[in-house]
Amino acid sequence: MDVVAYETLVPFTTKDGSTIREFIHSPAQSLAEATLKPGQSTMRHYHALSEEIYLLTAGSGTMELDGDVREVGEGDAILIPPGAWHELRAGSEGVRLLCCCVPAYRHDDTYV
C-alpha cells in the first residue's frame, strides 16, 4: 500500500507557473495540490493528452476555459478536457486546489 504524508512532499514549480506538491504519480494518473498567491495566475496553457480535474479546497479565483470565464471558489470542481486552453487567476486570498491528471502530469504535455 502506498501512503504519502503531506509533510514529506517537496514543492516545485510547474511549466504553467503554479507551485505544486505531488501526492501520487503513477503511469496512469497523478494527484497534486497546487497553490497560487493572491492575484497570481497560471500561464494560459493546454495539455494535449491529459484530462484534468481541479477541485478548489481554499480561496477563490477566476477560471478561463477555452474562452468561457467564471468565478470559482472553495468546493468547486472543474473538468478540463485534453486540448482545452485554460488559466486560473487567484482572488484576493489566493487559491489552493487538488489537481488530478489522467494520464499523469508531464511537463512535455504542457503547451503555453
Image (spheres, rainbow, N blue to C red):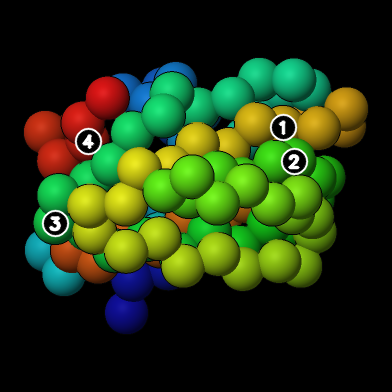
Structural distance between the alpha carbons of marks 4 and 2: 21 Å
Asked which secondary structure carries label 2, the reply is strand
Q: Residues within 10 Å of mark 3 (few under 14, many from 20)?
A: some
Tag of residue 61:
2
Q: Give the mark, 4 or 3, whose residue is nearer the N terminus.
A: 3
Task: Give the alpha-carbon distance from disc 4 to disc 1, as whole Å.
Answer: 20 Å
- The structure residue drawn at horizontal position 18% and vertical position 63%, both measured from the top left corner, is 103
Q: Secondary structure at mark 3?
A: loop
Residue on which disc 3 sits: 49
Q: Quadrant of the N terminus?
A: bottom left
Please name the amino acid that badge 3 sits on.
Answer: Leu
On the question of residue 59 being in view, the answer is yes
Residue 95 lies left or right of residue 67; in this view the side is right
Residue located at (40% from left, 60% from top): 80
Query: For the residue marked with disc 1, what is the amino acid?
Result: Ala
Q: Position of residue 92 (x, y in %)?
A: 88, 27
- Amino acid on which the number 2 mark rests in the picture: Gly
